[in-house]
Amino acid sequence: RSGVDLVIAKHGARRELLEHLTLDGVIADYLADESHEWSKSHLDDSRRRGEIVAHKFGALRPEDFTALMLNKLHGKITESGHHLSKKAGVGSIYEADKIRGFVHHLYVWASEPNRGYGLEGVINPAQRRRGRRSKKVKWSEQNGAHKRQRVMRPDENEFSKLLRAADATGNSVDGVIVRLLWLTGLRRKELLLRRWKDVSFEQQVMLIPGNPDIPGSTKNGLDHHMPLCDRAVELLQSIRDPKTLSIDPDALIFTTPKVDPRFGKPITQDFSGWWEDTWRKIRSTADLRCWGAPDPGFRVHDIRRSVSTWLIEYRGHDDTVAGKLLNHTSQGASITEENYHADLGGKLASNQALVSELQDMLALVEDGRETEFKAEGVTPILQAFASDRG
């Protein structure tokens, strides 16, 4: 009626869009797509990696971003880190691989015809060709990245080495943190950003809230009631200041040793980020090895991974039971979100039994008997895997 050809108008609008389309615009649309249903932590990581790519190549058209450019960025981060990645040094190899993965998924998403970007025939710059040998082997040999499936090895007394290194930092709270990470299996921020109000000494339970607006909340958005064994309660009470607790139960459990010169009070902002530097020192002092070579890539999260692995390998529990302790709701834990909270009392009882076993294993490690905590009738495959080198 108005004399407008809608088809011509649509093609004209699309041409105008594609003429001004840049990589940073595609990244912004990708991160804003609510259909991803990402967790908060995954969204934060994706935003950081998108910022790195956009900072370097954002002004380019998507089809002009080549594999050679991405390889150069990957090499730069692998060798010396990147000022935007906040992963310089030891963590740069892992971050470089993750940025490559971000670009791969970005182009897969943008190449879908219904997106309207016209990138259906554009080569994905993060696409890697498979050679005659395994892709994982080639990638590992190329940049020296360690597999994420890293666990502490009892036959190498790695847990004992970590404990001794943590106790030798000169700050008693470091040894407490490493032990509590083992006794709870919590993620770094889930433990280090807890407040005293989250702990019930009477019921011996620590609450990790599922609200994503609360720092240190659970990854899956579900409240997690972590039972505390007697040793965990003892460790928490050893660092508790009764005066501070009586005045401010909302105070953080762990604070930095730094003091604000203006008020003479501890600086309590995001202790988990500050402790990362301390962890690197602990790891370096422990001198962990991976197949005989120095292993600077051992992460705090590997303690959590060791908790589940050792419970399965050396105490005979299945992944469903271990998954409940670690608050998993994925297929890896063999449970669904619907039945996960069907019986909170039963789950707490099961987890209490597990943390008691973790307490027993910690006692053996501290006594120098790390290789003796295998339960009778359990045949672990971890040592066989280690001797076979995969």
Image: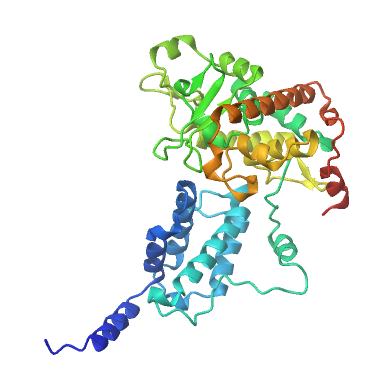
**Up/down of 315 relative to 116, above or below:** above
Residue at (60% x, 17% y) in the render: 233
Q: Nearer the viewer, residue 39 or 141?
A: 39
Q: Position of residue 175 (x, y in %)?
A: 65, 24
Whether residue 163 is visible: yes
**Up/down of 51 relative to 111, above or below:** above
Q: Nearer the viewer, residue 248 or 96?
A: 248
Looking at the image, what colour scheme do you see?
A: rainbow
Q: Quadrant of residue 232?
A: top right
Q: Nearer the viewer, residue 214 or 278?
A: 214
Q: Position of residue 322 (x, y in %)?
A: 67, 37
Q: Position of residue 213 (x, y in %)?
A: 39, 38
Q: Nearer the viewer, residue 187 or 262?
A: 187
**Up/down of 354 relative to 249, above or below:** below
Residue at (78% x, 33% y) in the render: 315
Relative side of 355 to 212, left or right: right
Q: Please identify the quadrant where the C terminus is shown.
A: bottom right
**Up/down of 22 relative to 14, above or below:** above
Residue at (55% x, 41% y) in the render: 339
Q: Position of residue 34 (x, y in %)?
A: 39, 58
Relative side of 15 to 254, left or right: left
